[in-house]
Structure formats: C-alpha cells, structure tokens
Amino acid sequence: MSDDQQLLETLALLPADALLEPIWNYSSPRGFYYSVPHAKDQERLAADLERLVAAGFAERVFVDRISLCPNCSSHTLNVREICLSCGSSNLEQFKALFHFRCGYVGPDASFGVEPGGLRCPKCHRLLADLGTDYDSPGTFFRCGACAAQFQTPEIGGRCLSCGGKFDQHGMQNVQERDVFAYRITELGKNALAKRAG
C-alpha cells in the first residue's frame, strides 16, 4: 500500500462529523490513545494524523498539555509542593500569627487561648487586640522532615516511572507534549468522496 493510500485509509477511520478525541489512560505509553477501529499502532496513527493535518485533510483542536520527565520522557510525573530547605514534600500548612512587641512569628495553635486574649509562647505576654498587639501575616508551611518554616514552597516533581526527583530548577527541564483532538476538513471529506466514487 502506498503512503497516499495509507493516509486515505487513516482518514476513512476518522469520525465523519465529530472530533476524534484522545482517551486518557495512564498505562498507555503516551498517557492517552485514540480509539480508532483497526488502528493497532498508536505511534503510526499519531504520525498519520499529523500527515493528514499537513495535507489539509484534517485539523487539530488543542485539548491539553502533558508534562514529561526530563530523564525518561514518561508522562507519569507527580508535581507537588516541596520544602525550600530539604526538598521534602512532607509539608503542613498553618495560619501564622505575628506578635509585634517581641517579633515572634508562629502557628496560631502555638499561642495559648485565655479569656483575655492569646498568650505569646515566646515572651508570655497577653495579646488582646488583633492589629494592635498582633497580626496574621497569612498562611505558612512547616516541613515535617526538617522543621523549616516558609510562606511559599517550591514546586518539585517525581517521576513515577524512573524514580527521578526534581527540585524547582530541575522542573525547568520538564518537557511538554501538546495533546490534540482531530477533525476532518472539507478537503478531507472531498478526498474521501473521490476515493469512494
């Protein structure tokens, strides 16, 4: 079978008046596949779909973008927040309080609750007024591995295929793959009509 015949065979497998949508599947080598009858080789099908686009017989419709491991190109990349100090993902989020007078910043749970207000765990003064005695600078994170505290964690990743770990700098090397749906163009419909006639 010639390349042009193969291309028309692939074109004939596409839905006539609908999108050929990707089907997400973690066990697929690409993270998705196209359910096309009689198409056994997904890599060949993907190449044929791109050739159909280049010939004007089909068009792409953007669906999503997949992040790929910079080591092995696997799509099974787990992206999560990590500690600035040690890179652990064992983070606990908490609301922080700041005592103006002594400068203590810590979790709101570390301040003792009393009838007259909150007791500072550092200087043991009673804090009665929010805004005058203390304030809440927002949400912080505490690392369960090294006890570091910070307001904004880094973004890191772990590949579930090769086991590679990546901090924020390593995440800059993450590859990306755009995922498309495909639809037959008028030119493609005409080519199929000529083939049938």
Image (spheres, rainbow, N blue to C red):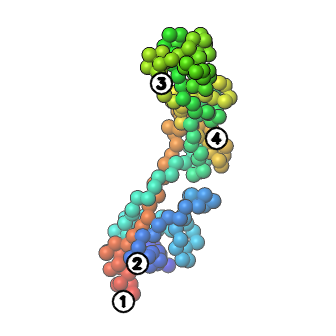
Which mark is first along the chain, 2 or 4?
2
Name the residue carrying label 4: 164
Which mark is first along the chain, 2 or 1?
2
- The answer to whether the residues at label 3 and label 2 have Cβ atoms under 8 Å apart is no
Is residue 56 left or right of 32 when viewed as pictured?
left
Seen in the picture, residue 95 relative to 171 is either above or below; the reply is: above
Question: From where the camera sits, is residue 5 visible?
Answer: no
Is residue 15 left or right of 79 when viewed as pictured?
left
Closer to viewer: mark 3 or mark 2: 3
Between the residue at mark 1 and the residue at mark 2, the CA separation in whole angstroms equals 17 Å
Please provide percent x and percent y for residue 74.
59, 51
Of the residues shown, which amino acid type is indicated by label 2?
Ala
> Dot 3: within a 10 Å radius of its alpha carbon, few (fewer than 14), some, or many (20 or more) residues?
few
- The residue drawn where x is 62% and y is 33% is 91
- The residue drawn where x is 62% and y is 38% is 165
Instruction: Tell me the tag on residue 197.
Output: 1
On-image quarter of the C terminus: bottom left
Instruction: Tell me the tag on residue 137.
Output: 3
Of the residues shown, which amino acid type is indicated by label 1?
Gly
Between the residue at mark 1 and the residue at mark 3, the CA separation in whole angstroms equals 73 Å
- The answer to whether the residues at label 3 and label 4 have Cβ atoms under 8 Å apart is no
> Dot 4: within a 10 Å radius of its alpha carbon, few (fewer than 14), some, or many (20 or more) residues?
some
Which mark is first along the chain, 3 or 1?
3
Of the residues shown, which amino acid type is indicated by label 4?
Gly
Closer to viewer: mark 1 or mark 3: 3
Foreground of the two, 133 or 59? 133
Foreground of the two, 100 or 71? 100
Which mark is first along the chain, 4 or 3?
3
Disc 3, SS: strand
Tell me which corner region of the image, top left, top right, bottom left or bottom right, holds residue 163: top right
Between the residue at mark 3 and the residue at mark 2, the CA separation in whole angstroms equals 58 Å
